[in-house]
Amino acid sequence: MADKQYDDGYMHYAFYSGCCFQGADARFFEILEKVFDKVDVKIHLIDDAVCCGAGVIEERSELTSLAINARNMASAERMGLPFYTPCSTCFNVISNVQKRLGEDKKLFKQVNEILAEDDMEYKGECKITHTLWMLAQDVGLEKLKERITNPLNGLRVASYYGCHTRNPGDIQNYESSDNPTSLEDILKVLGVEIVDYDTRNDCCGYHLVWPNNKLSLKMTGDVLKGAQKKDVDLMVTSCPLCFKNLDGLQNKAVAATGGDFQLPVLFLPELVGLACGMSPKEMKLEWHGVPVNVRL
Amino acid sequence: MTEKITPVREKILSNIRIQRFTPGKDRSPYFDNFKMEVETGMTILEVLRHIKNTQDSSLTFRAFCRSSICGSCALRVNNKTVLACSTQLMPILKDFGKATVTITPMANLPIIRDLVVDIDPVIEKLAKMHPYLVENKDRVPETLEKESLMSQEELEAFGLMTDCILCGSCYSACSAVKADSNYAGPLTIAKAYRFSVDPRDDFRGMRFQAAMDQGLWSCVQCRKCIKVCPKDTRPADSIRDMRRISIDAGIHDSPGSRRAKAYTDDVERIGQVNKPMLPVIVHGTKGWAAIEAAEAGLKKHGMEPTRQVCSLPGQSGAAKIYAKVREIEGKKKGGKTNG
């Protein structure tokens, strides 16, 4: 996926951060850059992008969501780079917009008429990807393996995709959405033992945090409980929003489901960084809600 | 469509793992394993019928039309809800790379026997949504001589949901129903939306009430219902639409509607959502505790908290887009009322 304008051995991506990395999570900008550098990937912030609206803006105006996200993609097109987002919901929302505009010429034209107000044009050429496929397919498992200096052998890990890189099935064509393996493929390269658990395919409830907090916490607690039952050392998720609930709200979620345990949860890039020899300090693991008291 | 179709009939000796359960007789559900040769093109329903005819006549499942229109044969294959009659087994075996496949009844519903579930809870919830047209006297002519004509655009507003066959697949896949059995489920809210945007109807307000009572804002938008719907009706999209028309109708007093307003307004104002203040915007004064807890967390790590995140450089461009969309939507709405 390396772009022609660079000839430095790195793969370059237009980086769409979304707005999940605010406050304490702002640390992930730096962490992602450092981790990706280990696997010869450079990310360039799309600096004139705006929040995708997380599908919530569609609850006010669908056309607004279509137009601002076509604009987000148009910005990446201007940079001439593939569109990378670490956020599964941004991936879902923006891929859905791309699909809608690809299927509906009238809508494509209308959205471009709107974008003309801002001297932008969405061409529909944007390739959208996510950490899962950037690592498993673009970087490739072979290269990733070469860069592992601290194999995490023996670590029992529960892998968790979350919903938005899997549903609906046609949201991506990188792999099977019914039986995705990219996360486990990456984790196997890192050396960990992958443990199956009942709630692996369940939803963490992140998008109910505001509209129905009680239900959100129950869903999070249920997912965690399923993994905890299998005596895993930690849980790893490829979605930064799932991470917010599974780690940040874990204490409340576990209490809401009548449990009493702590299960360390890592965001996938963190574990990749650790396996590539970076320290827990560099990964800022002390910022986690649940202490990561596992030897890594 | 010039590709020549060459029928390659593969055969795989498979292990079909089927959940069995007779309430009152069995203490809990258990699995039976059936060995059989699965051929290319064979549907799940054909597999089940073959097993019933040749291996175990007591195996119980429900099926009728074999044309994915009656909606009675929904069940789960490797945990995904599908219609048995329109789903082939071979691609699933290949996708999972295993010769074993697990068939279970739909989730979130009581089991009657083996693969047959009681669909009544869905129908009861649907009935509460007033899933019928209540005559709009301004629109429906008084005499039978005149027809109640609809424009293409009006039809398109609810077109997808008229294809719903009430199979319950979305209900089985629903994350929110799994966590809260009182939640209405995807198809019921989607159906409520379908009738609410029908110009011949005059009962929208009651449906808003019914949808709010049954959890309009409990849908988590996991999009699983869109994935499993055999008729591609996209229930989660209709739920978003139902939320939208309820807000448009002036129902702003739920945390979900306040979130929708905050997200939409913030992106126009600063290009991103001002998350530090969301607890108060969504929950009022009750949200202060959450803000203070988040700020204490930041201070612990030496970060200075803010209650107003910065405006992104893309904001001015996005604001132009908002203005243009507003102009288009204003015209559309104006057109409708005047017309």
Image (tube, rainbow, N blue to C red):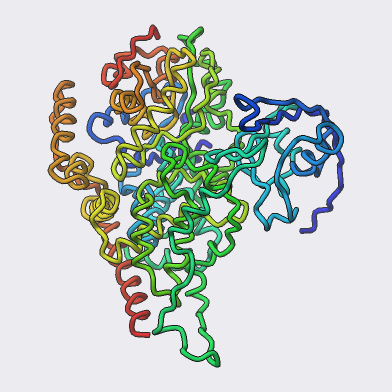
* Residue in the picture at 48% in, 51% down: B186
Q: Quadrant of the C terminus of chain A?
A: top left
Closest to the observer: A154 or A17? Answer: A154
* Residue in the picture at 52% in, 25% down: A198
Closest to the observer: A2 or B269? Answer: B269
Closest to the observer: B264 or A230? Answer: A230
The image quarter in which residue A117 lies: bottom left
- Using the rendered image of the protein, determine whether residue A170 is visible from the camera's viewpoint: no
- Using the rendered image of the protein, determine whether residue B301 is visible from the camera's viewpoint: yes
In the displayed structure, B87 sits above or below B54; it is below
For residue A198, side relative to residue B92 (left or right): left
In the displayed structure, A154 sits above or below A74; it is above
Residue B282: image x %, image y %?
A: 22, 46
Residue A260: image x %, image y %?
A: 33, 17
For residue B25, side relative to residue A289 (left or right): right
Residue B256: image x %, image y %?
A: 29, 50
* Residue in the picture at 59% in, 62% down: B163
In the displayed structure, B249 sits above or below A205; it is below
The image quarter in which residue B68 lies: bottom right
